[in-house]
Structure formats: C-alpha cells, structure tokens
Amino acid sequence: MPNQVVNGAMLTCSFGMAPSALTVLPVNRVQTEHQPAATIQDHVPNVNIMPFGMCTTPTNPQVAAATTAALGVLTPQPCIPATTTPWVPGAVTVQIGNQPALDNTSKCMCMWLGVITVTSPGEVSEQIP
C-alpha cells in the first residue's frame, strides 16, 4: 500500500548525485503526524523540490556545455530542478485542498529528463487506501 508523503520526505533524481528533502508549505493546513501533508502540486523548483547536488544528464544545457568544453568528457554541473508539471499519479482517492494527496509511488519529471522519486515518505506510517 502507498504511504502519504509529508514535509521532510527524502527524494532522489535519476540524474542527481545526492538526495534532497521535500519541503511542504503549510498552506493546506492538513497535517499527518505533525508534518504538513503533500499534494501533487508540491513540485515547485527551489520551493518544494530542492537541488540534488550535481546534475549528470547531457540534456541539461549547463551539463552539455561543460561536457563540450571538456572535449566530450561528461562534466556534471550544479543541479537546478526544472519541474514544471505536478507529481503523477498521486493518491486520486485522497484529496487535500481539492488536490490529490502525494503518495510515495508518485513520480515527478524534470524537464532535463530526470525522474524524481520518493525514497522515504517522511515521518509518517499512515497508508493510503
């Protein structure tokens, strides 16, 4: 069963070199185990989704430029998350502020083709039906 995701959940990106923590602002006023509960709309770069250390995807223009300058040797660059769409699919049967709740099976896409996943849902053990 999927678990509800809350503030402080650990995330990874398929092209990032370090994990990151999800930041959920308390705008919906819904808490699970004393932490703000996340929705699929908690995908804003540098607000909800923080950098993943260094980025290694050649589709990122900064990585591509640095790699070209290094004569084709992959040269990671600082991660700047570029998430423009909500998490999918979310927990469609559980609504928070008229949005599907975020569960630990959802994914978020970075525009540089990285796939962001939840590795730990946060301080929560509540399962979503």
Image (spheres, rainbow, N blue to C red):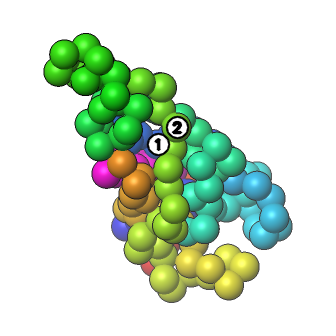
Q: Would residue 18 be found to the left or right of residue 36 on screen? A: left
Which residue is painted at 50% across and 50% down in the image?
A: 82
Q: Eyeballing the image, is 42 above or below 54?
A: below
Asked where in the image residue 27 lies, by quadrant, the reply is bottom right
Q: Position of residue 2 (x, y in %)?
A: 41, 65
Q: Residues within 10 Å of mark 1 (few under 14, many from 20)?
A: many
Disc 2 crowd rating (10 Å Cα; few below 14, some 14-19, many 20+) is: some
Q: Is residue 119 magenta?
A: yes
Q: Nearer the viewer, mark 2 or mark 1?
A: 2
Q: Which mark is residue 11?
A: 1
Marks 2 and 1, how far apart in space? 14 Å
Q: Is residue 45 found left or right of 1 in the rendered image?
A: right
Task: Specify whether residue 18 is in view.
Answer: no
The residue tagged with tag 2: helix, strand or loop? loop
Residue type, numbered disc 2? Ile
In this rendering, the answer to whether 113 lies above or below 89 is above
Instruction: Give the residue displayed 62% in from the left and 80% down from the top.
Output: 99
Residue that carries the numbered disc 2 in the rendered image: 80
Identified at 29% across, 37% down, the residue is: 57
Segment tinted magenta in the rendering: 113-122
Instruction: Work out whether 63 lies above or below 94.
Output: above
- Residue located at (19% from left, 16% from top): 71
Q: Is residue 111 above or below residue 30?
A: above
**Dominant secondary structure of the magenta stretch?**
strand
The answer to whether residue 48 of the structure is visible from this angle is yes
**In the rendering, which numbered label is found on residue 62?**
none
